[in-house]
């Protein structure tokens, strides 16, 4: 990505290749629980993944062999990376507020690490519109479980040093995420939420760990290119002696069913 181009908040143009190559997957156990909640064989389900990015969660869904799976992504670079990976997924351009999908068509609609970019009221109206009666919407995130690693906690603290006012909008522990249970508790279109979480671990090479950081938008846009470069130099120095980096992730999901 050119250092001359200022990164806009929420715009992943130029980050899609790193995103597709290095971002970790989600907990398979959480996916199994979500599918169990729907109460139908996976092979009969029509599934739509909105704000699909490069298709990390979408491909996990596709591995369960649903009857159909559609990915909707507004960013051209992200969508192109996802479509290039194949997997029997139909890719379309659209947003959380305007998916362009047919009404009453899907058993499961999901947003993985993307619902925070959507207007809550407009998005939930749209998901209700495209879901079948009794269908399920799930919003999920995959934050790192920093408590498992003093080194990763130390690296995270460096961000606060560089920008004490840094706001983690896209984090799976952001204020938006923490308020979801309350916001869905008395929703006019959906039943109260089922909260799920599953912890899983990965060993990353230095290249993979650095690649994950190079795929972020939220932090990079707030730090600016100069401070982000300082942060990345610090990361490379801090992990230089590590043969691999143990990363734990906590998939957090809120699943809600369409009200009868």
Image (cartoon, helix red, strand yellow):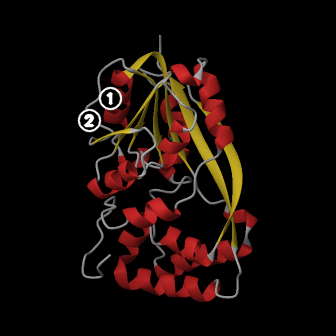
State whether residue 111 is above or below residue 156: above
- Number of residue marks: 2
The percent coordinates of residue 55 (x first, y second) are 44, 48
> In screen coordinates, is 256 left or right of 188?
right
Residue 201 placement: quadrant: bottom right
Instruction: Say which residue label 1 marks.
Output: 126
Identity of the residue drawn at 47% across and 10% down: 260
- Give the spatial CA distance, label 2 vs label 1: 7 Å
The answer to whether residue 81 of the structure is visible from this angle is yes
- Image: 1 above or below 87: below
Q: Identify the residue at image location x=36%, y=17%.
A: 104
- Residue in the image at 38% along x and 31% along y: 124
Looking at this view, is 49 or 153 the one in front?
A: 49
User: Is residue 82 depicted above or below 3 in this figure?
Assistant: above
Residue 175's label in the rendered image is none
Relative to 186, is 1 above or below?
A: below
Is residue 168 at all visible to an observer of this figure? Answer: no
For label 1, the SS is helix
Mark 2 in CB contact with mark 1 (< 8 angstroms): yes
Closest to the observer, 81 or 30: 81
* Residue 127 found in image quarter: top left
Mark 2 Cα shell of 10 Å, populated few (<14), some (14-19), many (≥20): some
Q: Position of residue 17 (x, y in %)?
A: 40, 65
Residue 110 image position (x, y, % from top left) = 46, 36
- Extreme residue in the top direction: 260
What kind of element bears circle 2? Answer: loop
The residue identified by callout 2 is 98
Q: In which quarter of the image is the N terminus?
A: bottom left
Splitting the image into 4 quarters, where does residue 215 fall? Answer: bottom left
In primary-sequence order, the first of circles 2 and 1 is 2
User: Which residue is painted at 58% across and 72% down in the image?
Assistant: 209
């Amino acid at each position: 990505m050119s250092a001359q181009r200022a990164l806009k908040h929420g715009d992943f143009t130029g980050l899609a290749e790193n995103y597709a190559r290095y971002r970790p997957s989600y907990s398979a156990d959480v996916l199994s629980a979500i599918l169990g909640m729907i109460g139908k064989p996976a092979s009969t389900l029509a599934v739509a993944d909105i704000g699909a990015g490069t298709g990390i969660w979408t491909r996990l869904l596709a591995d369960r062999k649903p009857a159909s799976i559609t990915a909707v992504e507004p960013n051209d670079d992200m969508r192109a990376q996802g479509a290039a990976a194949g997997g029997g997924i139909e890719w379309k351009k659209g947003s959380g507020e305007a998916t362009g999908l047919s009404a009453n068509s899907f058993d499961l609609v999901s947003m993985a690490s993307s619902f925070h970019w959507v207007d809550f009221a407009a998005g939930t109206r749209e998901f209700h519109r495209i879901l079948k009666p009794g269908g399920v919407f799930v919003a999920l995130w995959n934050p790192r479980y920093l408590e498992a690693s003093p080194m990763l906690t130390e690296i995270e603290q460096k961000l606060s040093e560089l920008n004490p006012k840094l706001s983690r909008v896209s984090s799976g522990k952001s204020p938006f995420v923490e308020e979801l249970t309350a916001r869905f508790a008395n929703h006019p279109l959906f039943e109260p939420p089922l909260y799920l979480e599953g912890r899983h671990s990965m060993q990353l090479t230095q290249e993979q760990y650095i690649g994950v950081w190079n795929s972020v938008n939220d932090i990079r846009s707030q730090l600016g290119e100069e401070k982000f470069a300082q942060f990345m130099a610090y990361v490379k120095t801090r992990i230089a002696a590590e043969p691999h980096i143990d990363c734990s992730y906590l998939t957090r999901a809120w699943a809600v069913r369409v009200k009868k």
